[in-house]
Amino acid sequence: MVFEDAYNVSSRRIFPWPEAVAEPGWGGGWVDVAPGETSTAHSHDENEMFFITDGSGLMRIGEETRRVTAGETVFIPPFQDHDLTNDTAGRLRFVTVWWGGAEAVAAERARWAAEFGITGAAAAADAGLSAGAAADAGPSAGGVADAGLSAGAGVPAGAGAEVAP
């Protein structure tokens, strides 16, 4: 694990060897939130899921906060500000997986354009991108999650993230 100042967590990417193994259209990692600490609040354009493997803490997505414990899964939709607080004296560990977002979509479109021999502005147009968008699809924030929590009762479908046992 390596401490990531930007997110105030320790983590290890699932695919940490870009020179040997190409990362698929999704990213992921093991993440620890230290006792008494909170991950840095952030949002991004990817979908994200947290699989809580050890400990418990307070998951905040948007204006909603819920306790999460080992064995639970949290879904965080794109563009939702979120953080996770370890309010215990023990370890809080989770696996995060994120997918989608502009970078992943642009990479997938470029792969298909190359496979079918489409180049330049034509490739961008055929992939549904403007020429500028194809060039500007820079890296996404990636990392911890974004959405809203809903454990079920009283929460409208699609209103936020899901927490599942």
Image (cartoon, rainbow, N blue to C red):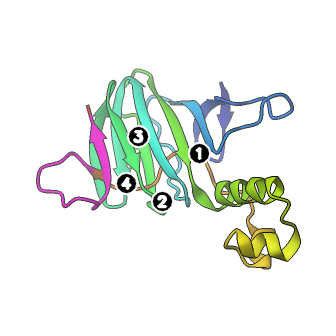
What amino acid is labelled 1 in the image? Gly
Q: Secondary structure at mark 3?
A: strand
- Circle nearer the N terminus (2, 3): 2
Say which residue label 4 marks.
Answer: 61
Determine the residue positioned at 64% across, 62% down: 102
- Can you tell which of label 2 and label 3 is closer to the viewer? 2
Say which residue label 1 marks.
Answer: 143
- Circle nearer the N terminus (2, 1): 2
Crowding near pointer 3: few (<14 within 10 Å), some, many (20+)? Answer: many
What amino acid is labelled 4 in the image? Ile
Crowding near pointer 1: few (<14 within 10 Å), some, many (20+)? Answer: many
Tag on residue 79?
none
- Circle nearer the N terminus (4, 1): 4
Determine the residue positioned at 27% across, 37% down: 164
What amino acid is labelled 3 in the image? Thr
Say which residue label 3 marks.
Answer: 85
